[in-house]
Every structure is written in C-alpha cells, then in structure tokens.
Image (cartoon, rainbow, N blue to C red):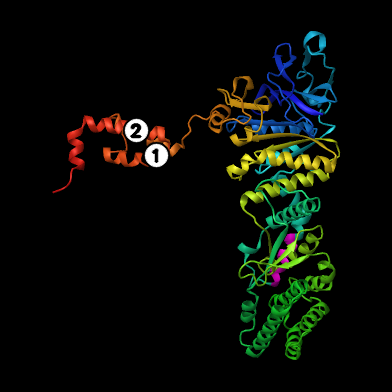
C-alpha cells in the first residue's frame, strides 16, 4: 500500500496542481472548471526502475523547490486528510493497495459547504485505465485510513498543530511535542513548585535564571532519546558511517556547593571548620574507594548532604531547632569508614517542615538509592581532570534513575547533578532527536503500512551527513520494518542537492512559483537525471538556482567588472581590482578578470606605470 499521486483543487497556494510520488505509472489530471469534471489518465513512467526491490521501504519521494513554492503546504495537506479534518475544496488521492488502484475524492461533508464543490471523476477508456489495472473509486472516504502517517519537522509553527490535530502520537514535529509537554497539568505543577520556591527563597531566587518552562519539554525529549538509544543498543542496531552515538552518558555534580555553604555559615567559624573536615574526609575516602558503584553512591550521598545544608537546613532555622540539632550532630559525627552511611541515615530521618525546600525529595532518593542503582552500570570517566565525573551505561533502567535526580533542584531551578549524552554536536543532536521521535512514533503505530513525511530533516547537518541522510533513513526504517513488521513510504522535502542525488527524478516533485506566487509543478521529464547526479547541475536544474556564487562575492565581482569596463564602480584604481582578484576562488572567473586587467594595463600603460614605478 502506498501513495501514488494527488490532485489538489485549491489549498493555500496550491491551485489545480497534480503531484506524482513515483512508481511504474505517472498520473495526469485534466480539470474542467465549468463542468467540474476531472479526467484522470495514466501512462508508463519513462525509464522506470524499482530501486527498492526486496526492501520493506516501498518508496522514497522528494519534494524540492524554492522557498514559498508549496513544499511544506503539500505535506500539511497530506496530514490534514490523514487527520480526517474537513476541506472546502476537493483533493483526489490515488493509492495502490495490493495491486488495486483506489481513487478517492476527499472533500468536506459539512452541509455548510454544499454540493457546489463536488466534482465528477472521469477515467479514460470507459472508466478504467489503459493498462488493465483494477480501479475502485470513492467519495469522502479517508484514503489514509489504513495507513499510519508520521510527520516530522525541526521547525516550530502553530500551523502544524492546526493541520494535524491534537492528541496525535504520530505527529513528531518539534512544535507539537513542545505543546504536548507543556500541558496545563504539567505547567500548573511547575508553576506551583516555582512559586513555592520563590516564597521560601525570595532572597536567593534569580528569576531570569530559574524560570524555564522549556525544561519540561527538554526533560521529555531527553527521556525519548535515552529510551531510543537503550532500545537500539539492546537490539544491536547502530547508525552507519561516522554518525555514531555513545553507549554511555556522562554525569557530574555541581562543585560550587562548598563555597555556597561558606557564605551561609559566615560568622560561625567553628561550624564551618567542622564542615570542612567532613568534606575533606569524604573526599579522601572516595579517592581510595576501588568499587566504582560504591564510589558513585557515596558521592551522591555526601553531595546531597552538603546540598541540603545550604539549600534546606539553614533555611529552616528556628523550626524544631533544626540548626541547633544539626550543629550538635555534626560536631559528634565520627570521621570513619561509615560516614556515608551515617550521613544517609541522618538525611533519611528528616522531613521538611517548610515548603520550598528539597529535603523530602532527598530523603526519598536516598531511601531508594540502592534499588535505583541496582541495574545501572557505572564507570569512572576517563576524561582528563574527571574527578567527580562518571559514565553511566545507557539501558532501559537509566531514565528511572535520572528523573529522580533531576527532580531535585536548587534555588535557581538547576539540578544538582548534570548529565550529557556524549559526543553531542548540534548535528548529532539533530539526527539523534529525529530518530528518537520516529522510534517513539512506531510504538504507537497500529497499521502495517506507514508514510513517513519529513519536512527538511537535513537541517543542522554538515554536507557530509546530508550526503548520508537518505541512506541513514533507509537503514533505520529497514531495520525497524523487521522489528515492528512494517512497510514504509518516505516523503521528504529538502533544499539539499545531496538529498535528491539519492532519489530518481521520477520520484521527485519539482516545485516553482507562478507569476501570482502560487505553487507550480515542473514536470520531471524536463529535468536532468538526479540519481547520483552532479551536485552543481542539481543546484541549477533541481533547485532553480540562478548563480553558483554567493551574493556578496557576486556583487563584488560585478563591481570589479564594471570598473574594468569603464563604468561607475566602488573600485577606484586598477591595482585595487588586481589585489581583489587574487582572492577569487573560481579559477575561470579569476582568469577572465585577469585578462581584462592585463588588457586595461596595455591600454593605459603610461598611467599604470606611474602608479607602480619605484620611488626615487
């Protein structure tokens, strides 16, 4: 089952346009607006060859063109229909389903729109196609009902939510997932916690640093990425080439705690000296501890103990004599091998008697610490100056531990323990996030056939990774087709010639804008072959690029040529133009300008000699 072609009467800037997504046959649509008849025909696709024979990827299509030509609008239209949302004007969708062609005219059934918008579909040769294909036609049926549609976009736009509808687990666009994270319930919980901290810590809370609703989304996103990596590590799937992700994450602790305690205990030198001895004793024991898991556990205990001192206990002075009892406890605390156990038991006993502190969360964490760490593999980081850094193996238990740690924050709403999936460049993050969203969508997929629509998925990627992008998608979905028993059709919009050099031109939809700014399809027959094509030719032919030089350099070169032609220019002297020309990278342009310079020197030899002759 796959999408073959569409005809759109009127949607945004798309008016009376047909789109072929690639296949053995190319479909044509001829619309008579007066009679409202749409004649549909098909013919064999010239030079057709199925690159995906034997694969569970049934088709890969590309939508390319200049900005504003309708690429994203076409993807959005597919999403609108899939979501079952009403359309005022007709869209005809052609789908192949087990060798049978299904042609559906989709339009709103709302009485408000009436029957004036209905069309009559006419198939050539008495209602069938010339190639003897079985055809069924439908009205106002959702043509994507038996397909799942995954949508991904890096860009944020309210339109995506409006087009795809809410409560749609297949919508993996950034803006939709952001809205899913910032639900009223989650925001209300964040605000309640924030306001409690603000009231309790008004002298310390830094509003511009601590208020960050986006952290809710970031934590949800990190959870999806870690779960994706965990599943892939378990299933032995790795990204091809040099796109690789670590199998561990690095964690480290805020090292500014002790300096904060010093500020909190100013004027109480004896107490500070006691704390300093405890801190030094813990540090020495950790350096001699050979068991890495114990070392990590003990680091958590003593870090959170000192964190609780400045973040909680000292702010509860006067309540049940916390400070008095704490000072007495610290002075009598034995500095022995059992100090971590003693600190943990002390924190586990106490409950907070004041809102806006983290003592209850710390107590819960330490009580559950052994069970949380039971399935976590830990190695001390090999990084230089890595004391206090640990590498945790990514597995299905990791996020349960991390979310407990991340829930405990200081007065700036920053978690005490930081972590990072390494290595983590912007390109790696973009690929990792994108694949983790596909991974999450597949968990909610119920149909065998899935359309994956991607709006400029190569954004943020280095050209070398753009070159590998289609192959990465192919490997990913081919692998997951076996895991989930799925077949995939991929439709991607792009501005990258590296993308279309992996797609035959018969599978590409070339879009331009007409004189009114509306979407205009440029038929693929008129374009150069794209599969394995020359990048510069693809820029010119596929993306309608007018020049191959960046605009600023292009203008400078024009100014140099104007000067050499005797026209008004920003260049004032021939020597200036000659120095500029040495910077030009394109040899053909540089040589031609040099010829003009040499010719100008010959014409004005006396004047030029005066400029360059040696001074006496």
Label 2, label 1: how many angstroms apart (C-alpha)?
10 Å
How far from the left and from the top, in percent, is residue 490?
73, 34
- Mark yes or no: residue 496 visible: no
The answer to whether the residue labelled 2 contacts the one labelled 1, judged by CB atoms less than 8 Å apart, is: yes
- Give the side of residue 129 with respect to residue 260, left or right: right
Neighbour tally class for label 1: few under 14, some 14-19, many 20 plus, Cα within 10 Å: some
The residue depicted at 59 percent of the width and 26 percent of the height is 512
Residue 17 spot, x, y in % from top left: 67, 22
State the residue lying farthest toward the left: 616
**Position of residue 605 in the picture relative to residue 36 (left or right):** left
- In percent of width and height, residue 611 lies at 20, 41
Q: What residue appears at the point 66 percent right and 28 percent down from the top-left corner?
A: 504
Front residue of 159/366: it is 366
Q: Residues within 10 Å of mark 2 (few under 14, many from 20)?
A: many
On-image quarter of the N terminus: top right
Q: Quadrant of residue 364?
A: bottom right
Boundaries of the magenta span: 190-200
Instruction: Return the mark for residue 593.
Output: 2
């Amino acid at each position: 089952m796959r999408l073959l072609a569409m005809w759109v009467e009127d949607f945004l800037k798309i008016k009376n346009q047909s789109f072929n997504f690639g296949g053995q046959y190319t479909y044509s649509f001829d619309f008579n607006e007066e009679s409202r008849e749409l004649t549909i025909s098909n013919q064999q696709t010239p030079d057709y060859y199925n690159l995906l024979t034997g694969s569970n990827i049934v088709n890969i299509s590309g939508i390319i063109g200049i900005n504003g030509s309708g690429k994203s609008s076409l993807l959005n239209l597919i999403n609108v229909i899939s979501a079952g949302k009403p359309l005022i004007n007709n869209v005809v969708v052609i789908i192949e389903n087990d060798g049978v062609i299904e042609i559906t005219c989709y339009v709103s059934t709302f009485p408000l729109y009436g029957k004036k918008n209905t069309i009559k579909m006419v198939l050539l040769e008495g209602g069938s196609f010339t190639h003897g294909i079985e055809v069924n036609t439908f009205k106002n049926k959702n043509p994507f009902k038996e397909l799942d549609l995954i949508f991904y976009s890096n860009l944020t736009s309210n339109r995506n939510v409006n087009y795809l509808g809410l409560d749609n687990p297949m919508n993996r666009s950034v803006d939709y997932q952001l809205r899913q994270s910032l639900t009223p319930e989650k925001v209300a919980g964040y605000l309640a916690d924030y306001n409690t901290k603000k009231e309790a810590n008004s002298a310390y809370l830094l509003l511009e640093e601590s208020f960050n609703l986006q952290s809710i989304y970031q934590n949800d996103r990190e959870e999806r990425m870690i779960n994706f990596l965990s599943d892939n590590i378990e299933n032995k799937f790795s990204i091809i080439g040099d796109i690789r992700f670590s199998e561990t994450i690095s964690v480290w602790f805020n090292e500014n705690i002790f300096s904060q305690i010093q500020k909190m205990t100013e004027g109480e030198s004896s107490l500070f000296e006691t704390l300093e001895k405890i801190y030094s004793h813990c540090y020495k024991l950790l350096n001699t501890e050979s068991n890495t898991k114990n070392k990590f556990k003990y680091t958590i205990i003593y870090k959170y103990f000192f964190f609780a001192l400045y973040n909680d206990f000292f702010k509860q002075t006067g309540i049940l004599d916390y400070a008095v009892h704490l000072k007495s406890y610290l002075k009598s605390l034995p500095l022995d091998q059992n100090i971590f156990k003693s600190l943990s038991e002390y924190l586990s006993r106490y409950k907070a008697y004041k809102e806006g502190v983290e003592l209850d969360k710390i107590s819960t964490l330490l009580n559950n610490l052994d069970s949380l760490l039971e399935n976590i593999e830990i190695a001390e980081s090999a990084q230089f100056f890595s004391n206090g850094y640990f590498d945790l193996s990514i597995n299905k238990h990791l996020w349960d531990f991390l979310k407990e740690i991340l829930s405990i924050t200081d007065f700036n709403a920053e978690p005490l323990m930081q972590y990072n999936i390494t290595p983590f460049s912007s390109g790696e993050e973009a690929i990792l996030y994108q694949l983790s969203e596909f991974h999450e969508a597949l968990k909610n997929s119920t149909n065998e056939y899935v359309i994956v629509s991607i709006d400029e998925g190569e954004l943020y990627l280095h050209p070398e990774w753009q070159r590998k992008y289609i192959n990465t998608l192919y490997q990913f979905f081919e692998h997951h087709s076996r895991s989930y028993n799925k077949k995939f059709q991929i439709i991607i919009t792009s501005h990258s010639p590296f993308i279309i050099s992996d797609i035959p031109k018969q599978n590409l939809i070339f879009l331009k804008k007409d004189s009114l700014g509306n979407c205009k399809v440029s038929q693929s027959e008129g374009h150069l072959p794209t599969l394995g094509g020359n990048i510069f030719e693809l820029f010119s032919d596929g993306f309608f690029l007018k020049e191959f030089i960046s605009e600023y350099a292009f203008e400078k070169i024009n100014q140099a040529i104007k000067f050499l032609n005797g026209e008004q220019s920003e260049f004032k002297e021939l020597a200036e133009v000659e120095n500029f020309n040495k910077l030009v990278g394109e040899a053909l342009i540089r040589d031609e300008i040099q010829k003009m310079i040499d010719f100008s020197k010959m014409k004005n030899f006396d004047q030029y000699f005066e400029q360059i002759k040696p001074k006496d």
